[in-house]
Amino acid sequence: MNGSCLEFKNLIRDAITRIRFAPQSNNLLISSWDSSLRLHNVDCSQLRLKASSESALLDCCFQEESVAFSAGSDGSITRYDLLSGISNKIGNHDDIATCVEYSTETRQVITAGFDKKINSLGHVWSKTPLDIYDLRNLDRSVESNESCMDVPIRCVSSIPYSKGYAVGLVDGLVKLELPYPSSLNKMGYMFRCHPKSRDGRNHMVPVNDIAFNPNNSGAFVTGDNVGNVSAWGAKSRRRLFELPRCSNSIASLAFNHEGQILAVASSHIYQEATEIGKPPQIFVHTLDESYS
């Protein structure tokens, strides 16, 4: 496995909040607390676009190769034309906007914020602990899961081409919900990302992000608050490999569309944005064929 650090002529001065690979290329979208959205080509290590914002950007996503969205600390949801650099606000939350996603199946932009609301094309509904919705009918949830609500959730990630998902908790646990191949039911289990220390105590380290490999069914990676990145097999329930520990927290993880490249954003996270830490970095790892 080969790894390298992306070089930036102008350093990212504040915390990275999200990295996302484009749907069909190795262009990497980067949002950060320095109020900028960047588009970086990983293959040639070239900055393709830098768009300034009036607020810190807490999340970003692609609609397609040339269109992206961001969620701002002022509550704004912004659409970007990545070819022209033109941007326009398309929505707003009453408080900080924390999440933005795009569904290619339903062509919807889904956003969430500290106002405890989820927005989609004018449809607004209140957030509950962990509800699952069919985007074709947002009037009611199709499933509610409160089995891990005793511990605060740090991240949620859906499994590509599946009805399963994973939840990362602040105490270092990951909860997986996997669909049975020939059943409408799901099987679920929880595991701790890191082994016990020598004194027998569990590591209470928040799991900051979870990313599934789009071309390797059930393979995923986790990144935690002390810089650890591990790859797992959901079905085998075992660790596949572990990357060298980063000096900062793991803020975000992303696979490219072929599942052969893993990008790791090492940065102090937005919950700690007032703290002074080491400069953010993004590491790019080319995965072995046996994994990707």
Image (cartoon, rainbow, N blue to C red):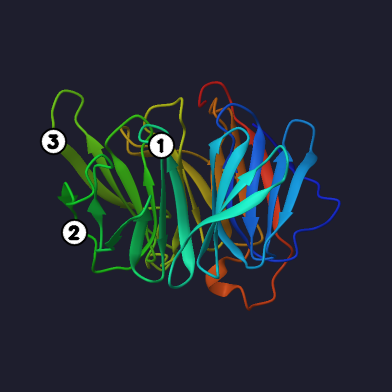
Give the residue number, with chain letter if any, for mark 1: 107
Neighbour class for label 1 at 10 Å: few (<14), some, many (≥20)?
few
Q: Amino acid at mark 1?
A: Arg
Q: Please provide percent x and percent y for residue 91.
A: 48, 58
Q: CA distance from mark 1 to mark 2?
A: 31 Å
Asked if 129 appears above or below 190 in the picture, the reply is below
Q: Earlier in the sequence, mark 1 or mark 2?
A: 1
Residue 170: image tag: none
Task: Please tell me whether mark 1 or mark 3 is closer to you in this view.
Answer: 1
Quarter of the image for residue 248 reads bottom right
Residue designated by label 3: 185
Judge the density around disc 3: few (<14), some (14-19), many (≥20) Cα neighbours within 10 Å. few
Q: Secondary structure at mark 3?
A: loop
Image quadrant where residue 200 sits: bottom left
Residue 128 at what x, y percent from top left? 24, 63
Dot 2: element: loop
